[in-house]
Image: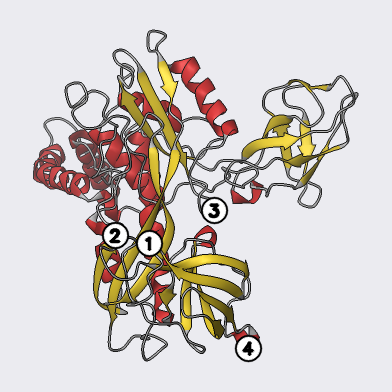
Amino acid sequence: MTKIITKTRDQVVADYERDYLNRVDDPDAIVGPGTFPRLMAVLLADQLMPLYANAQRAGEAIDIENLTLAELRTYAASKGVTLPGASGSSGYVTITAATGGTTYATSASLIEPSSRAEFRVTAGGTFQDGEDVPVASLATGPGTNLEAGTVLQWSSAPAGSGTTCVVAEQTDGSGLTGGADEEDREQILNAIRDQLANPPGAGNEAEYRDWIRKTKGVKVEEAFIYPNVFGPPTTGWTFTVSPGRYGSRIPTSAQIGLVTAELAAKAPRTDPQFFLPVVEEDLTVCVEVTWDAEADGWADETPWPEYFATAPTSGSGAVVIDSATSPLACVIETTNGVYTTCGDVAPGMSLGLWDAPNQKWRRKTVRTVVGTGPWTVTFDGTFSASDTTYTPVAGQRVSPWSDSLLHFEAPIVAFFESVGPGEAHTPGWLDGQRGRRYPAPPKSWPDRTTKALESGLESLASVDSLDLVEGGQVVASPSTTPHLLVLADFAVYPE
């Protein structure tokens, strides 16, 4: 909504009389009640008031989608929508200490030597050699994120402490994470829509989400509440964080600790609340495609392999990597050991492999082949014929190569970054409503692969037609450790 400011009736009358006095060449002119200028001023005000009212209604009817970023922030504030803003990173550092340990005060300072970025201990105490100490950055933004293994220096190391420490590795391989810029347009719009549809109050689900989102030092992407998760009056909660790298939507233990402390301070004492850790559930997606006539088609005249199911009732199974010793050497097999219907890989063929950690396609050009299934294959690493950085992973699908595969990277990654954790209980538990995730899937943060995945890929200009043959309509498994679907493998075949 755009706020349009108009004059009041009294302001119109006063402005008219002032202008009248400024324009008439008569020092004895009189304005005020009962005068002719006052009559004209009142008549003008009567004419303008309906026009002003219509202008205000038009402003209120303007779609928030058309507001500028600054206007969106103002509108969000007017509606009481809390925007966390830019956030800093958090995580742990591994310390070195003398026998008996050393004591770090809360807010003890560390410095990253090259950037001079400053970090502070968030929970002090006595720590032994090799233990992890929770820290958070003082600044905000993605520049505060640090890789695991980065060396930090203590500004003033306490007695018994080493002068340096290293950033500890989180379970997903990251280090200090959570640093992000202010919200973009879509994030602000989503927050406004959610606030208008689900106003928080009285410790309801919306207020729990609001408390989680307001946690300082954590760039909460979305919060999810599970009312009565273990029966009345329990409340389960979890959240995802803004992805800084693939796979990092799962919050770290440091981020969980900050949110837990926030809820402990604000949630009703009568609410037994439980954090529900999110568990990744791997998913393989396979599609068959016909490329548009103007797009880059298959690199080989006879693309190999075709699509085969993992466990077919007859014939060959899916073509996958059996093992790999380097980026340029691997063994390829079928999932069921049958090779009568799948054809053969041959020197000169171009194959595609999905590099899941980096969300990219990797091209491999076959140099030599030994065997008729399984096949021991080497790839040509000269003149950029093959990617020389990615080592294939056992069990992953093999696709034929097309340069148009690169167009699939952005939409499929965007889809999996839009999914949310699944339900805690199977449908039908209790009365069918209690225990359900809030916000409810699949319309909001779907817990499954929806038609949006297939339509997003098929809408690409390089695609003429597309069929999702594996990985469609998969629902995350219900669990009190909510499952989050992640793209573990991706394969594309000729239709």
Q: Amino acid at mark 2?
A: Leu
Q: Which residue is mark 1?
A: 412
Q: Earlier in the sequence, mark 3 or mark 4?
A: 3
> At which x and y percent is residue 439?
28, 35
Residue density around tag 2, few if under 14, some if 14–19, many if 20 or more, within 10 Å? many
Contact check, label 2 and label 4, Cβ < 8 Å: no
For residue 245, the mark is 3
Q: Residue at 40% across / 63% down in the picture?
A: 335
- Sequence-wise, the earlier of marks 1 and 4 is 4
What amino acid does circle 1 point to?
A: Ile
**Earlier-in-chain disc, 2 versus 1:** 1
**Relative to 302, does residue 430 appear above or below in the rendering?**
above
User: Which residue corresponds to the image point at 41% horizontal and 34% vertical from the top-left?
Assistant: 82
**Element type where label 2 sits in the image:** helix
Residue type of the residue flagged with mark 3: Arg
Q: Give the image's coloring scheme.
A: secondary structure
Disc marking residue 383: 4
Q: Residue at x 74, y 40 (%)?
A: 118
Residue annotated with mark 2: 453
Give me the C-alpha separation between circle 3 and circle 2: 21 Å
User: 117 or 303: which is nearer to us?
Assistant: 303
Q: Are discs 1 and 4 less than 8 Å apart at CB?
A: no
Residue at (58, 76) in percent of width and height? 387
Determine contact: label 3, label 2, CB under 8 Å.
Answer: no
